[in-house]
């Protein structure tokens, strides 16, 4: 019987897994509508009082996304005021949902990676992940890898989709 050879393990193919860079930490979404009258009307005095009495320490060392889930017309200062209360406790605050938050985290960390290790190598951007890697992270990673990689594919080694091949000089 012939020995089964793992050609992928023996290849020069480099795997770029965005999950490896997923920032550790709890993520939470805060819905501003919880402090609006019937979810739609901001009464400034009541709003300020609710924020003042809220336990902001529960967000210690968390990544926070702030949004309003209703169609309420909310003044911009309301989001900023919530941010002022959160800032002493959180790692990061953004206006948007959890996916926007994750995208923002990747936008900060991807430029800091040394992509030169992928110089003239075939690279596969790993497609399957157990963590919620946003599409914006894949788009950014491809842009950062392109100047270095010999080729870029997406997916898994057994079923990769070719995306880019560097021009021959």
Image: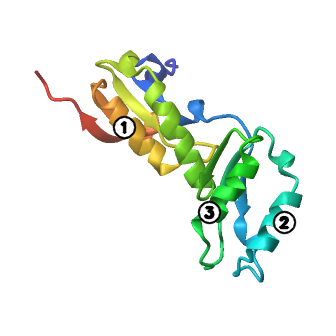
State the image quarter where residue 130 is shown: top right
Disc 2 residue crowd, few under 14, some 14–19, many 20+, Cα 10 Å: few
Cα–Cα span, label 1 and label 2? 47 Å
**Is 11 above or below relative to 105?**
above
Which residue is the site of mark 2? 49
Which residue is the site of mark 3? 77
Disc 1 residue crowd, few under 14, some 14–19, many 20+, Cα 10 Å: many
State the image quarter where residue 155 is shown: top left
Cα–Cα span, label 3 and label 1? 36 Å
Q: Are marks 3 and 2 in contact (CB under 8 Å)?
A: no
Q: Residue at left 58%, top 53%?
A: 99
What secondary structure is found at the residue carrying circle 1?
A: helix
Visible in this render: residue 12?
no
User: Residue 64 appears at what percent x and percent y?
Assistant: 69, 49
- The disc label shown at residue 99, or none: none
**Is 16 above or below relative to 43?**
above
Front residue of this view, candidates 165 and 5: 165
What secondary structure is found at the residue carrying circle 3?
A: helix
User: Residue 101 appears at what percent x and percent y?
Assistant: 59, 49
User: Residue 114 appears at what percent x and percent y?
Assistant: 43, 19
User: Residue 116 appears at what percent x and percent y?
Assistant: 36, 17
Front residue of this view, candidates 41 and 33: 41
- Side of 60 where 108 appears, left or right: left
Q: Residue at left 53%, top 49%?
A: 134
Disc 3 residue crowd, few under 14, some 14–19, many 20+, Cα 10 Å: few
Mark found first going from the N terminus, 3 or 2 = 2
Q: Are marks 1 and 2 in contact (CB under 8 Å)?
A: no
Which residue is the site of mark 1? 142
What secondary structure is found at the residue carrying circle 2?
A: helix
């Amino acid at each position: 019987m012939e020995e089964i050879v793992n050609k992928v393990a023996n290849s020069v193919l480099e795997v770029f897994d965005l999950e490896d860079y997923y920032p550790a930490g709890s993520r939470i979404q805060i819905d501003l509508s919880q402090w609006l009258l019937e979810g739609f009307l901001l009464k400034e005095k009541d709003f300020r009082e609710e924020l003042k009495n809220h336990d902001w320490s529960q967000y210690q060392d968390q990544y926070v996304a702030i949004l309003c889930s209703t169609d309420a017309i909310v003044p911009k200062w309301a989001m900023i005021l919530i941010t002022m209360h959160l800032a002493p406790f959180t790692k990061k605050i953004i206006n948007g949902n959890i996916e926007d938050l994750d995208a923002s985290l990747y936008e900060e960390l991807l430029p800091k990676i040394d992509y030169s290790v992928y110089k003239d190598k075939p690279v596969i951007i790993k497609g399957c992940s157990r963590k919620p890697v946003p599409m914006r992270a894949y788009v950014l990673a491809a842009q950062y890898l392109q100047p270095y990689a010999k080729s870029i594919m997406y997916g898994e080694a057994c079923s990769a989709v070719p995306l880019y091949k560097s021009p021959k000089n």
